[in-house]
Amino acid sequence: MAVSQTFLPGPTSEPAGPLMEPLSCTGSLAKGFLEEELRLNAELRQLQFPEPVGVIYNPVDYAWEPHSYYVTRYCQGPKEVLFLGMNPGPFGMAQTGVPFGEVNVVRDWLGIGGSVLTPPQEHPKRPVLGLKCTQSEVSGARFWGLFRTLCGQPHVFFRHCFVHNLCPLLFLAPSGRNLTPAELPAKQREQLLTICDAALCRQVQLLGVRLVVGVGRLAEQRARRALAGLSPEVQVEGLLHPSPRSPQANKGWEAAARERLRELGLLPLLTGECPARPSTP
């Protein structure tokens, strides 16, 4: 039986909270980015997924409040570098609405809060608890932990960089097991990723991105495919995924990632040694 995507109809409440005052700016770029995400959601609603998919979560819908504040606060100007994940994890973005969004990092370092609603269809083994979730996402803790060490403060990272997922959907098997897009049936996978690829092109052009760093091989491969031939040209590189399922990452992800960032010439951007790009009027 194919699973339809029962998403919420869109933003359902106005975000609120003292932690999340947006940076002073017109916010037009952030607004445009959010509009692109809502456009992508509308296109993805038309898809259906057969087994092995049992339940689908879209945190851009039910976690709209913290997600929109993440974008509003940290996507205020053009970005030279986009770190691109593949899709949400069950204990990261699925809980917080923030890519690689390990709860403690989102709340305590990024300063994001807000209400997270219950998904229209919730798997009993994968409850959405929002910022009350007590299970840490290892990938997110590793990913943001590195940039916290390098940058000190979030504004140093986000002066030049942004973090986004190619696909906003989390897929769960009937058992509750997390399914990656690579595990979907070929036809549905290609339909899904073709739509996401087109959205990525629009998002990259909107932000003025010059370099996309795919976090994990699949994200890198899809970015190369999606952005090939884009004008002006966008460079695509890869970064080892911090997943605990990766033996290589478990041997010392932070050291490997830091060396890769050095190879890509990104360390000066991440340590505040390079001035910010001027915003376009």
Image: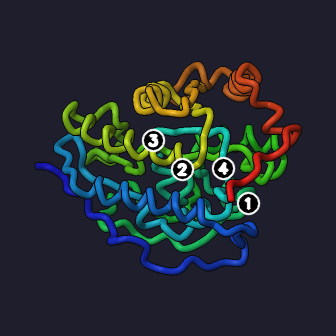
Give how far across and how far down residue 21 sits, in percent.
Answer: 72, 72
Which mark lies nearer to you, 1 or 2?
2
91 with respect to 120 (left or right): right
Which mark lies nearer to you, 1 or 4?
4
* Secondary structure beneath label 3: helix
* Secondary structure beneath label 2: helix
Q: Which residue is label 4 attached to?
A: 78
Residue kind at label 3, given as amino acid type = Cys
Q: Which residue is label 3 attached to?
A: 201
Tell whether label 3 touches label 2 (CB within 8 Å): no
Q: Which residue is label 1 attached to?
A: 108
The 10 Å Cα crowd at callout 4, few under 14, some 14 to 19, many 20 or more, is many
The 10 Å Cα crowd at callout 2, few under 14, some 14 to 19, many 20 or more, is some
Q: Which residue is label 2 attached to?
A: 206
138 with respect to 159 (left or right): left
Quadrant housing residue 275:
top right
Judge whether 193 appears above or below 113 on screen: above
Give how far across and how far down residue 256 sits, in percent.
Answer: 70, 22
- Tell me which label, 4 or 3, sits earlier in the chain: 4
Give how far across and how far down residue 156 sits, in percent.
Answer: 80, 48
Q: CA distance from mark 4 to mark 3?
A: 15 Å
Instruction: Identify the residue at image location x=26%, y=34%.
Output: 190
Tell whether label 3 touches label 1 (CB within 8 Å): no
